[in-house]
Image: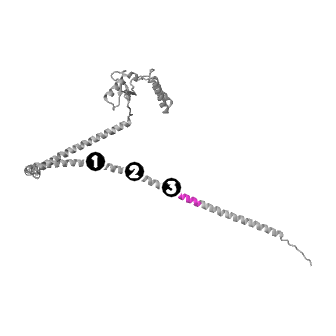
Amino acid sequence: MTSFSYTVDTDPLAHQMDRVTKDVEVVGGAVTAMQLAVIASEQEASDAICKSLDDGFYMLVRSRFSQRLAQFANTMGVRVGSMVDTANAINRTREQMSGDFHRIKSRYCKLFDKLDRSLEKRIREIDRDALELARKRSALLIERQRKEVPAALLYSTDTQKAALKVSTARVKSRVSSSISSLCCGAQRVIEHNNTMHTVLEQSSTAEPQAVCVPVIYAAEESSSAPGSFFLNVYAPQSLSPDSQSLITAGVRRSGESLIKTSARELAAIRTAYAEKVAAAQLDARTSETMMHLFNASFTANGTPADTSTTRDATATGGTQ
């Protein structure tokens, strides 16, 4: 009988199955990863949607509240303005009513005062006889007795003592007031002397000394004679009239030399004026115009070109 021998090799199939298994596992892992990625993406999308919804709802509610707040603020502003206007109107009305009340009150007070005086006059006219009788009765019965009371109560010696005491008291009162006045005057003199000793320099020289007194003089143009100038001299009011007259006469005697201005003074005045213009930080055109007008206001000899101007200065006079 014929026999057959077969050899079945399952290794390739096993290898193929192993490969298929590995591929299936890889596909399963990919599917699992894809599922996880899909779940994560869906969760992220849902979170984004929820966040967007929350933000949108918050913004919507916030905008609604902002609109309501703005509306309420406008309403409150309008109402506050209306209340302020109403309060001002009420204050004006109250002030007007107060003025009307005081005016009407003063009117009625005057009316009632007139009525009171009129009634008083009428009552006096009606009761004039009774009042005259009462006055005469008082003068007859009471005044004489009242005048005689001190004589009845005091003897002649007592009245003399009372009169002496009264005159002595009057003399003492007048002497006390006189002494108080003299004390106050002496105290003021002492205080004045102390002040003068502290202010003035003590010197015992017998030679006459020059005392410097500040004097203000102004050269002004005469209104009656144009082109002519005269000096107004202002001496301190604390000096005596004789000293003021001497100082005024001395300044006016040297008036020509005081009115004229030297070149050095003009240069100093121009320098100070230029410094003031430069410190003002003006534009170049304004500065040049100011300097040109200043230079044009003086002539070559240093006197004012415009005779209508007034120049004030301060001088020092001496008294012996």
Q: Tag 2, which secondary structure? A: helix
**Residue ID for mark 3:** 63
Taking the magenta stretch, the answer to whether it contains residue 51 is yes
The amino acid type of the residue labelled 3 equals Ser
Res. 313 in view: no
Sequence-first tag of 2 and 1:
2
Instruction: Single out the residue that lies furthest toward the right.
Output: 1
Percent coordinates x, y for residue 314 in the rendering: 40, 28
Residues under labels 2 and 3: Cα distance?
Answer: 26 Å
Percent coordinates x, y for residue 29 in the rendering: 72, 65
Sequence-first tag of 2 and 3:
3
Residue 117 in the figure: left or right of residue 193: left
**Residue ID for mark 1:** 99
Q: Which is more toward the observer, 319 or 80?
A: 319
Span colored in magenta: 49-61
Q: Tag 3, which secondary structure? A: helix
Question: Which tag is nearer the camera, tag 2 or tag 3?
Answer: 2
Residue at 69% of width from left, 64% of height from top? 33
Taking the magenta stretch, the answer to whether it contains residue 1 is no
> Which image quarter is the N terminus in?
bottom right
**Residue ID for mark 2:** 81
Query: Cβ–Cβ below 8 Å for labels 2 and 3?
Result: no
Residue at 20% of width from left, 44% of height from top? 171
Residue 16 in the figure: left or right of residue 29: right
Residue at 47% of width from left, 25% of height from top? 267
